């Protein structure tokens, strides 16, 4: 059975980024909760790209990202009966996927993986305050590949919050729900993540100009 | 404007250090206000550059989606696992019940 016919088109970027109601999603959820495999396939087609993107950005490895996408959707299949619509389905599914990713990182022995710890990276990994160094300016100088690489180098907790907010477009209240943290925590960690990313990008620029 | 030691900028109206400004920065970003009007930024090139960079990073991040789809084998594997789940739940077909033979 192919997942193609029901796939959402990424033509409108903003449409994908914020959690708009998706035509046919509510009906597909209800049918999948009743055990309809085709309806579940529809849900997979609607959400596979975002779940896979999250996994790939968190792991930086296609095979591992596909494995975790598979795990996340299998968990979805087993738990979809418990979805009550208290939050957007996409947020609920992402919370599930985030847990799958964090479990995987914990198994791999990557530090700072519990939801609480993920939001409090070790001191050494934090961004520096910026009270000087005007020598470099990022504006206009960062291409997509450079930014993707710098994101990969963020500590997992910062990477997660940055990807969810700045890349995927989730709001702080949604992230707080996904990660079981406060909205204030989500905001402050996002700021630290951006600061850390700036450090990484500037360091990359320094190395490039030194060569 | 008087420029004191690194990280401290004073104006006639108020004293705002870079540390003070950067402490407020996460909340300022969240208000989505136009930061170019901020008094500290008007006088502190260092913090203005920081704000420009952070805004630039957030803008560039929005351009990163979408990543391509997972390979078709992912759905194939999910479907197989679902069917295995279902067949293990249902177990072997029940034995035909034996009608009471009566006494």
Image (tube, rainbow, N blue to C red):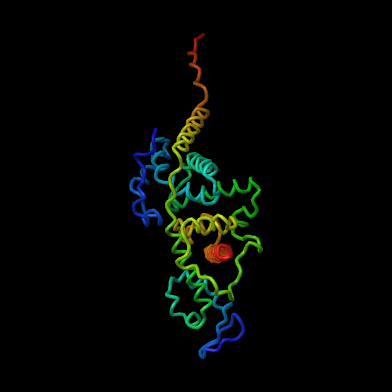
- How many badges with numbers are in the image? 0
- Residue A57 lies, in percent from the top left, at 52, 51
Q: Residue at x 56, y 84 (%)?
A: B9
- Residue A123 lies, in percent from the top left, at 66, 64
Q: In this view of the protein, which residue sits in the foreground, A102 or A210?
A: A210
Q: In which quadrant will I find the N terminus of chain A? A: top left
- Residue A78 lies, in percent from the top left, at 50, 39
Q: In this view of the protein, which residue sits in the foreground, A164 or B89?
A: A164
Q: Residue at x 52, y 22 (%)?
A: B92
The residue sitting at the top extreme is B103
Instruction: Classify A14 as above or below A26.
Output: below
Q: Residue at x 45, y 39 (%)?
A: B71
Q: In which quadrant will I find the C terminus of chain A? A: bottom right
Residue A184 visible (yes or no) = no
- Residue A162 lies, in percent from the top left, at 51, 59
The residue sitting at the front extreme is A211
Q: In this view of the protein, which residue sits in the foreground, A24 or A55?
A: A55
């Amino acid at each position: 059975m192919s997942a193609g016919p029901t796939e959402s088109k990424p033509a409108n970027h903003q449409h994908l980024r914020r959690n708009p109601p998706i035509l046919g999603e509510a009906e597909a959820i209800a049918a999948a909760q009743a055990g309809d495999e085709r309806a579940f396939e529809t849900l997979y087609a609607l959400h596979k790209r975002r779940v896979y993107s999250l996994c790939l950005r968190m792991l930086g490895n296609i095979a591992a990202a596909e494995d975790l996408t598979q795990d996340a959707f299998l968990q979805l299949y087993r738990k979809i009966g418990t979805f009550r619509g208290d939050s957007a389905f996409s947020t609920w599914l992402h919370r599930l996927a985030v847990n799958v990713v964090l479990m995987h990182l914990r198994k791999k022995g990557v530090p700072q993986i519990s939801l609480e710890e993920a939001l409090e990276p070790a001191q050494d990994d934090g961004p520096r305050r910026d009270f000087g160094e005007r020598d470099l300016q990022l504006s206009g100088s960062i291409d997509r590949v450079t930014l993707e690489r710098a994101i990969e180098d963020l500590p997992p907790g910062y990477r997660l919050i940055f990807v969810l907010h700045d890349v995927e477009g989730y709001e702080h209240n949604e992230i707080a729900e996904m990660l079981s943290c406060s909205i204030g925590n989500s905001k402050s960690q996002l700021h630290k993540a951006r600061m850390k990313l700036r450090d990484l990008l500037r360091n990359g620029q320094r190395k490039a100009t030194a060569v | 404007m008087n420029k004191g030691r690194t990280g401290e900028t004073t104006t006639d109206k108020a004293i705002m250090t870079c540390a003070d400004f950067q402490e407020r920065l996460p909340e300022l970003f969240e208000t989505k206000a136009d930061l170019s009007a901020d008094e500290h930024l008007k006088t502190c090139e260092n913090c203005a550059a920081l704000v420009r960079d952070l805004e630039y990073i957030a803008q560039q991040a929005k351009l990163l989606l979408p990543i391509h789809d997972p390979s078709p084998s992912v759905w194939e594997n999910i479907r197989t696992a679902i069917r295995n789940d279902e067949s293990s739940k249902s177990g072997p077909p029940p034995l035909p019940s034996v009608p009471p033979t009566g006494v």
